[in-house]
Amino acid sequence: MTPSSSELPASELHVTCEWREKAAVLSVSGEIDLLSAPEFEDVVAGALAREPAVLVVDLRKVTFLCSAGLQVLASAHRRLADGQVRVVSDATVTTRPFTSTGLDAWIKVFPTLEMALGTGSS
C-alpha cells in the first residue's frame, strides 16, 4: 500500500539568509525534494524581493537535491542578470545535478563561499 501525502515524512530543510553588502547569501541544509522545494522557493522569492545584486546559494550542507530544487534556482536566474545567481557546492550530491542538466552553463558553481562572492582566490 502506498502512503498518502499526509503520511509521508516531513522533509528536513533549513535555510538562513545573510546579507553581505548587496549580496543575499542563502545557507541551506537538509534535503531539497518535492516536499521541501516550495518552502525553498518561498525563501528564494523573499530574498529576491529585496533586490539583491547577487544571490549566492550555499548548498554544501544539502544531502539531496531534486529537479524541483533546480527549477527554483533556474527561476531565480531568470529574474536576475546573467551570472548573478551563484551556487556553492563541494560535493557531487549537489554539483552533479547542475553538470548533468547543463544548468551550470547559466548558474556557476563554486567550491567556496568566498569564491562565489568574488572575495577569494580563483
Image (cartoon, rainbow, N blue to C red):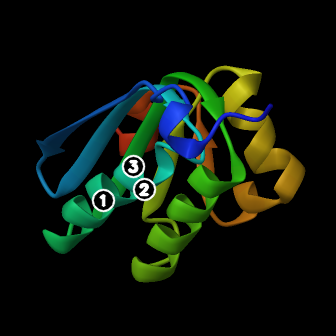
Which label belongs to residue 40? 3
Tag in front: 3 or 2: 2
**Side (left or right) of 84 relative to 109:** left
Residue at 46% x, 43% y: name it. 36
Return the residue found at the far right: 100
Q: CA distance from mark 2 to mark 1?
A: 6 Å
* Label 3 neighbour load within 10 Å: few <14, some 14-19, many 20+: many
Q: Residues within 10 Å of mark 1 (few under 14, many from 20)?
A: few
Residue 97 vs residue 11, the one in the foreground: 11
**Can you tell which mark lies on residue 70?**
none
Residues at marks 1 and 3 touching, judged by CB atoms closer than 8 Å? yes
Please indicate, yes or no, whether residue 118 appears anywhere in the rendered image.
Answer: no
100 above or below 65? Answer: below
The residue positioned 28% from the left and 42% from the top of the image is 25
Q: CA distance from mark 3 to mark 2?
A: 5 Å
Amino acid marked by disc 3: Phe
**Residue 65 image point, x, y percent:** 64, 37
Q: Quadrant of the N terminus?
A: top right
Which residue does the image show at 68% across and 44% down from the upper left? Answer: 66
